Image: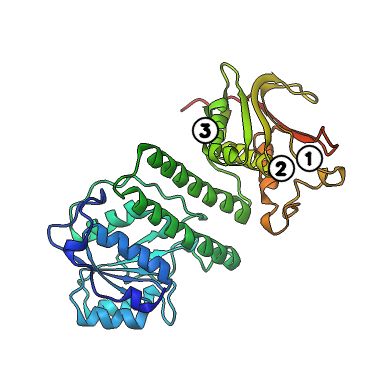
Amino acid sequence: MSDKELETKPLPRDEVDAGQPSRPPPARALTVLCVDDQAEALFIRRTLLERAGYHVFSALNADEALQIFKSNCIDIVVSDHLLPGATGSEMARIMKQAKPEVPILLLSGLVDRPPDTLHVDQFIHKAEGPDRLLQAIAEMTGAKTASASTAPFLIKKSQSVSVAQSDQGTATMAHEINNPLDALINLLYLVEAEPGITRTAHAYLALAREEIKRIGQIAQAALHDQRDEKSRENADVPQLLWSAIELYKPRFESRGISVETRGCVGGILAVYSGPLRQLFSNLLLNAADAMPNGGRLRARVSKGCEWSGQQRRGLRVTFADNGCGIPTQNLQRIFEPSFTTKGSHGTGLGLSLVMNVVRKHDGRLRVRSSIERGRSGSIFSVFLPAAKVPAAA
C-alpha cells in the first residue's frame, strides 16, 4: 500500500457510510490524528474512525505527524508506541509542549505499558478491540458514546511489570503477534457493520472473534508457559465439544469428512473451559488433516472410570478417525514441542498444547493408531477426572 493511498485528506462527510452500526458520531465532526508505522494497520484504523464519524489525518512516522499536528486543528492524537525515529511517548512530549490541551491516546502491541508515558493522557493495548478504542476517544474528547462490550484478550504478562523488567524476546514476540491481531479485530468489526450481512454470517463472525481470542491464549501459553490463574468452573463438556465441531463443520464438509457425535446426559464437570475447548479444536483439526481425501470422524463424550492408577471417576472424550494413521516411530514424539509431520505447514505446537491441557486437568491421554492399509486411523482418548469447585466465600 503506497503513501499516496494514505494521504491525509479526510473523507468527506457525505462519503461516510451512514448505515454502519458503529459508535454514534460526536455532535460535531472531531478531527483525529492517527499515527502508525504499519501502512495496512493505519489504513484499517483510519477507516474505522472515519466510519464512526471522525475526520482523520494519518501519518506513518513521528516527523510527519508533528508537521500535521502543528499546522492543523487536531482534537485528539491516536498513536502507536513503536515508531521509526521516535517513540509515541517521545512524540507526545513534543506535542504537549506545542498544544498541551490536545489529549493523546497511546496504543501498543507490547506486553505491558511502555515506560516514560508521562505526557500520554491514556494508554490502551491494541488488542483491546475497536469498541474500547472508540470508547476511549469519546471519553477523552467529551463525545457521547455507547458502553464498550469488547473485553481485552491480548497476549500479556502481569500489568505491574514494565517492559524494561520483562524478557525482551517475549515482549518482541508478543508485539509482533498483537499487531496483526489488532488488524484482524478491526477488520471483523468493519465487515460485521457492512449492510446485507446475514444472521448466519454474523454468527460466523462471532465465532471468528472467539478464534482470534484463542490465538492470543495459545500464544500466551506458548510464550510464557504459564498456567491459567482462573479457577475451574462447572461446564457442559459435551456442549463445549459440539460448539468446536460446529465451528469446523464447513471445513469437514469441504473435505468430504462425515462427523458422528455421541454425548452423555449430565456431562457437567469442573474444567478450564477455554483451554479444554482449544484441546478439542486441536484434536479435531488434526483428524481433518489426517483425512485430506475424506473420511469419517467419531467424537464421543461418556462417563467412566480411569483405566489404571487411581481409577477415578470422570468423563472420557474420544476422537476416532479413519485417516492415514501415525507411524509407530512417531507415536512417542508427537507430543514434543516443535515436532511435526506436516513439514512447513505444521508448527508442532498443537499436540504439545493438548498434552499441557490434559496435565492441567490432572487427566490422562491415550493414543492408538494404525497405518495398515484398509484399517488405518487414530483414536485419541482424553480422561478428565471429576474435581470439585471450591465453594464461594
Image vertical order of residue 160 relative to residue 261, above or below = below
Q: Secondary structure at mark 2?
A: loop
> Could you tell me which residue is drawn at 25 percent across and 62 percent down?
50
Amino acid type for the residue under numbered disc 2:
Ala
Q: Is residue 307 visible?
A: yes
Dot 2, crowdedness within 10 Å: few (<14), some or many (≥20)?
Answer: some
Amino acid type for the residue under numbered disc 3:
Ser
Amino acid type for the residue under numbered disc 1:
Gly
Indicate which disc residue 290 carries: 2
Q: Mark 1 — residue?
A: 325
Picture coordinates of residue 294, whole percent (x, y):
67, 38
Of mark 3 and mark 2, the one earlier in the sequence is: 3
3D distance between C-alphas at marks 3 and 2: 21 Å
Of mark 1 and mark 3, the one earlier in the sequence is: 3
Left or right position of 6 against 340: left
Q: Mark 3 — residue?
A: 243
